[in-house]
Amino acid sequence: MVTIKDVAKKAGVSIMTVSRVINGKSNVREDTREKVLKAIEELGYVPNSMARSLVIKKTATIGLVISDVTNPFFTTVARGVEDTAITKHFTVILCNTDENPEKESMYVEVLARNRVDGVIFTSASGKKNPLKSLFIKKIPLVLIDRTIEGLEDVDVVRGDSVLGAYLLTKHLIELGHRRIGIIVGSKTISTAVDRIEGYKRALKEFDIPIDESLIKINDKSKFSKEDGYRLTKELLDMENPPTAIFGGNNLMAVGAILAIRELGLSIPEDISLVSFDDIESLSEVYPFLTVVKQPAYTMGVIATELLIRRIERKDRIKEKREILLKPELVIRKSTAPPKIKN
Amino acid sequence: MVTIKDVAKKAGVSIMTVSRVINGKSNVREDTREKVLKAIEELGYVPNSMARSLVIKKTATIGLVISDVTNPFFTTVARGVEDTAITKHFTVILCNTDENPEKESMYVEVLARNRVDGVIFTSASGKKNPLKSLFIKKIPLVLIDRTIEGLEDVDVVRGDSVLGAYLLTKHLIELGHRRIGIIVGSKTISTAVDRIEGYKRALKEFDIPIDESLIKINDKSKFSKEDGYRLTKELLDMENPPTAIFGGNNLMAVGAILAIRELGLSIPEDISLVSFDDIESLSEVYPFLTVVKQPAYTMGVIATELLIRRIERKDRIKEKREILLKPELVIRKSTAPPKIKN
DNA sequence: TAGTATATTGTTAACGTTAACATTAAAATA
DNA sequence: TATTTTAATGTTAACGTTAACAATATACTA
């Protein structure tokens, strides 16, 4: 393989001069620079980033760990991260854990071994243990969307799930619903917990007793379409089923729609449905679901800016920063007053 | 930072013994292995992949370059790639070029510099030049979805765009449409060219003259929602507008829907619409668009298997392999006979 | 038990860069 | 012109790991 040495020999200069040309250092005479550039071109030399990083102890790379690439919320976050990183000359390594704690641990290990300069992380497990290698290596970390229990001293960028869930629930209550089911992913995930909290807060405010059997939260479940489908069926199979369902995220809401339809019920006539997070490609074409929208792209941007600031002057800022973004209620056609008052 | 040296010292062995333990080599006595493991744990040692790769000249990493993370077609491909790579102990670096030739060149350069073992690539530019660094470094390459002009000796995994477009167009013709508009991304992209070819083939088969003004292909345009919107407006602004529109991909079809609606027209009453590629999250909830579906996940799987085979025995297979996957026509509600016969 | 085979450990030289310093060439000053 | 300053280039050692071989300890054989 062609190395810096070969280029140096061909150009008749020292390897250090070649290095300077590659890195655009100023103190190289124009004609030698050209000689070197010509040699690089002729030999087809491509610098080795690993050798470089080994010496300078920087990789100009950040790891982005998301829990589901097929969820438009996260791909939008990813776009925000990428667009921001690129302007600061960082490359993004995107890792998809698929809501799988094993993949989560594996990817963190890979990122740590590859000495990324920083990591933006959405937790799939809700545990801090998988992040150990990052702490050990003191690799700057920004959590996005989901917090992690027992990990208080780290930057977080997230939407206000409590508020969002409160708004959604309140909207349903104001329409006249009293029995509102809620389906969320694993209770180890902060957004699941927060959304339940917002839900309960709204119920309390309207003096509606909380019926725990309407809260479908399952340790085995994820924020996925399949689980949304399953949990919705469970809700509707109850003796006294809810008149409205709160989908814990966009994918669960889709699963809920499928389950509701399969039972021959219609939305919103027979049952109202709301969702946390929108699906833009759906709603644009078919403005149906009443949702709470989060500024996903902005979350990506902010998280990246925070992270890069941490990377660039590591020790300076000691205190942890938590950025809470406001969600927005978008009322569409999936909600209506309940059929029968109760 | 903690290195293999520190571990060796702490465990009272040579660095080579530590290396053997890390890499799970067999010839280490059980008690020394435990000593080493204990030292690793206590010191919080995380191996440095870059130093390792520098020596062994392998990174166990493959680069996946897609042209749009927010397009569900590509995220599904990505899932296929990732799931397959993981079973073969490869890590995936996902790069999103956003249909931007500059990003494309940049990412290829980054991957080459990082010495990934192989690359799976969807072209945004349609040019082979951006891939130069990969050829120079003889990094195995598999193209996915889109071919590249003048690059004949490389593996390709793609859907049969000619056939898919033919099926879609034929379906419209059989409904009675004679003036069918088609909107596609840049003509430098193979799928755009192929889809036009399939379209023309169907028209010819039914002896319908080809009206070039119905073919909206724009060098500035991409396969994006915005361009779908714009080109549809252009079509509908014609003196003799089409009675049906063929959206070159899923995002363009969404743009078309928005444009058509904005003009106060309804689908399929006033105008029929078909799309190449589905949007699952949309169609599941709202089974509206008539589409041709491609096996995106399978494409990812096959591409990865092909690539990894190339990586593992580079020279053996000389001939290029082209995998052509059959698309599937799914007729839904966006197509109907035209209003007025012509 | 001595001698040989085998299993376990260690030593040294790479891998391809850059930082830090050393040297040389060129330019500026007196 | 001689001297000082500055610009351009070169040398060497490190970065953290593994391959290849070397050395030692242990087990096996006769």
Image (cartoon, coloured by chain):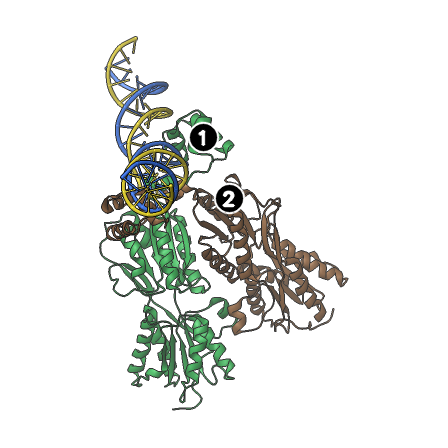
Chain colours: A brown, B green, C yellow, D blue
Q: Position of residue B96 (x, y in %)?
A: 42, 59
Q: Nearer the viewer, residue D19 or A268?
A: D19
Identify the image quadrant of residue B150.
Answer: bottom left
Q: Position of residue A265 (x, y in %)?
A: 60, 71
Q: Amino acid at mark 1?
A: Val
Numbered disc 1: what chain?
B
Query: Is D9 drawn above or below residue D14 in the view shown?
Result: below
Query: Is A235 drawn above or below residue B235 in the view shown?
Result: above
Q: Nearer the viewer, residue D4 or A16?
A: D4
Q: Which residue is mark 2?
A: A139
Numbered disc 2: what chain?
A
Identify the image quadrant of residue D3.
Answer: top left
Q: Amino acid at mark 2?
A: Ile
- Residue A184 vs residue A79: left or right? right
Q: Which residue is mark 1?
A: B7
Q: Mark 1 and mark 2: span between their CA atoms? A: 20 Å
Q: Nearer the viewer, residue B274 or B64?
A: B64
Q: Quadrant of the C terminus of chain B?
A: bottom left
